[in-house]
Every structure is written in C-alpha cells, then in structure tokens.
Amino acid sequence: MTLFDELLRRRDEQRRARTRVVIKGRELPWEVNRHGTMRWYLHPQIEDTAHQSCLIYEQRLDGGGRSGRQLHQGGAVVFFLDGQGHTVIDGETYEWVRGDVLQLPTREEGVVFQHFNDDPDAPARLLFVEANLVEALGVDRGSGFEQLMDAPEYG
C-alpha cells in the first residue's frame, strides 16, 4: 500500500468514526481533575465528533473558588458564561464578568495562568477553546504543558 493509499484508508476510517454532529452539554460527565471541575466537548480522546480541530471544555469554579495554575503555550480563548472574577496571567491580573472573552497570549516560553471566582456565593462557568495541536506538536506544543498547582477540589 502506498502512502497515498494510506491517506485514503485513513480518510474512510475517520468518516465512519466521526458521526456526532451535536454535542449535548447536559449529557457530558463532569470530571474533577488537577485543573478543576470540567466537562469536555472536544478532546483528542473523543473520536466520534465530526471534527477534532479544537480542544473545548467547560469549567466550573465554585463560589470563591479557583482553577489550578497551569503553564500553557497560550493561544487559547476563554469565554466567561457566568459569574465574575479575575485571571492571573504571568503575574498580571485581568478582571472579567459574564459575557467577557479572555485571550491567552502565545509566547515562546508559554504563559502561566489561573482563574479565580470573586463571588463567594455563586459559581462561575467558563468555556475554554484552543486549536487541537496535540497530534501535530505533542502535548507540550513547543512551550511546555505543566500543572503548577492543583485545583482545591482535586485529591
């Protein structure tokens, strides 16, 4: 089999596997991990979605809560669905409220970020979106990918 034939075989395999067009958030499980409480819409391990060009997760921060602190290559977009709080990026604080969008800058050395819910009585929710470059560049994506501090609900 030629490499071109292998591409065609892979294409056909992907067409058969990628059947889910609508992803219903209410059907997705919440997980508690080192970065916090989240549910995944698109992830490299979720293979039945119509495409896999993005990583997308929803994260919930309890009243007064925070995410874990993470080193990330940047280039992600965060849409704040509910709540009010702030995000610290490389030591600089950025305030946000429901409806705001935050963009993690792309830096060769990566960025360190952490989200905080400033309302002690109500949860905050955010939607995190970035290009899925895991297969092309690896999980480090050229800059490193480290969990520097765990979320309080983990462990």
Image: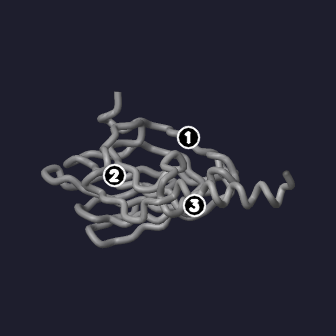
Tag 1 near tag 3, CB within 8 Å: no
Farthest-out residue, left = 121
Mark 2: secondary structure: strand
Q: Earlier in the sequence, mark 1 or mark 2?
A: 2
Q: Which residue is mark 2?
A: 59
What residue type is disc 2 on? Gln
- Residue at the location (41% across, 42% down)? 35
Identify residue for label 1: 146
As displayed, is residue 67 above or below residue 20?
Answer: above
Instruction: Give the CA separation, mark 1 to mark 2.
Output: 18 Å
Residue 105: percent from the left, percent from the top?
56, 64
Q: Position of residue 76 (x, y in %)?
A: 51, 62
Q: Residue at x 47, y 60 (%)?
A: 19
Q: Residues within 10 Å of mark 2 (few under 14, many from 20)?
A: many
Tell me the amino acid under the disc marked 1.
Answer: Glu
Q: Residues within 10 Å of mark 3 (few under 14, many from 20)?
A: few
Labels in figure, total = 3
The residue depicted at 48 percent of the width and 53 percent of the height is 48
- Spatial separation of the CA atoms under disc 2 and disc 3: 30 Å
Whole-number angstrom distance, CA of label 1 to CA of label 3: 33 Å
Between label 1 and label 3, give the one nearer the viewer: 3
Q: Which residue is mark 3?
A: 15
Task: Name the side, left or right, on which 68 lies relative to 45.
Answer: left
